[in-house]
Amino acid sequence: MNNKYTTVLTIAGSDGSGGAGIQADIKTFAALECYGLSVITALTAQNTMGINAVYPVSDTSVIEQFRSIASDIPVDAVKIGMLGNASIIKTVALLLRELQGTPPVILDTILASSGGTPLLAEKAIQLMKEELFPLTSLITPNLPETARLLGMREVPETPESIEEAAMKLLESGTTSVLVKGGHGDGENCRDCLLYDNRFFWFSSKKISTGNNHGTGCTLSSAIAAFMARGEKMESAVEKAKAYLDDALLAGAAYRLGKGNGPLHHQCMQWKQGQTTPLGGRPME
């Protein structure tokens, strides 16, 4: 009798430096015992110091990538990352409606890079809300993204204002909202999940590291992986946050490139396999 893979499909941009995007998604799926599938929406020229260029792929390419996978392989969950423009947003919405079954869909609302490079035009933001939010199980904006999605002049900071913002985002049609608090003040990262008409707060101590490239991609991918494995929303978010913290902590011990380095997505596998991972060298 053959074993069955648990599959997660990522629809996102490519990061050749491996810290974010499709590459981070697939590493996360593998670390959490899922089989990663991918549809690339854009090619980026980037490294640890930032994004130098973005090259969106054609709508036809996105359609053919998606339909080739969906016609052959069952999809247990979907993670959506960088989409790049309004046309691809419309295309992805069309394709999600074609997908067999009702797999959970996690949308990481990427509006700009961590370095501030815009990755989605203002006009496309409203389209994302109208076309994609109603098709999602969860959206995962950080605090600045939450403010921008709602047209707020200031980023919500208090628990009350964050909960109010989450409720307004829910009105856009999504099933659940996770407002990530990593950009907030204080020593702790406090994330607010609005799910099933209830608020759940998750708090963890912030990890001081310059190696945090791809945190948003990793968290949303981890949530998708746990939901593909059958976890309920609250549990999936809790376990995904624990995985993210482990990857951040392990990644802090390494150096890659001259700028903002990646998380260590395979930290648990390396730890189990050998005391000194292949290719790992002590920091100077």
Image (tube, rainbow, N blue to C red):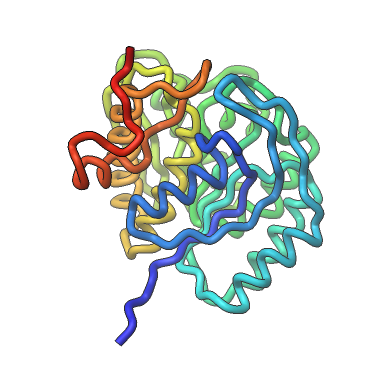
Would residue 205 be seen by someone viewing this image from the given angle? yes
As drawn, the residue found furthest toward the bottom would be 1
Residue 229: image quadrant is bottom left
Image quarter (top left, top right, bottom left or bottom right) of the C terminus: top left
Residue 85: image quadrant is top right
Q: Nearer the viewer, residue 79 or 166?
A: 79
Q: As displayed, is residue 131 above or below residue 113?
A: below
Residue at 43% from the left image edge and 62% from the top image edge: 35
Q: As displayed, is residue 260 above or below residue 238?
A: above
Q: Nearer the viewer, residue 188 or 218?
A: 218
Q: Is residue 167 left or right of residue 280?
A: right
Q: How many marks?
A: 0
Would residue 200 be seen by someone viewing this image from the given angle? no
Q: Position of residue 259 (x, y in %)?
A: 52, 17
Residue at 56% from the left image edge and 31% from the top image edge: 146
Residue at 29% from the left image edge and 44% from the top image edge: 238
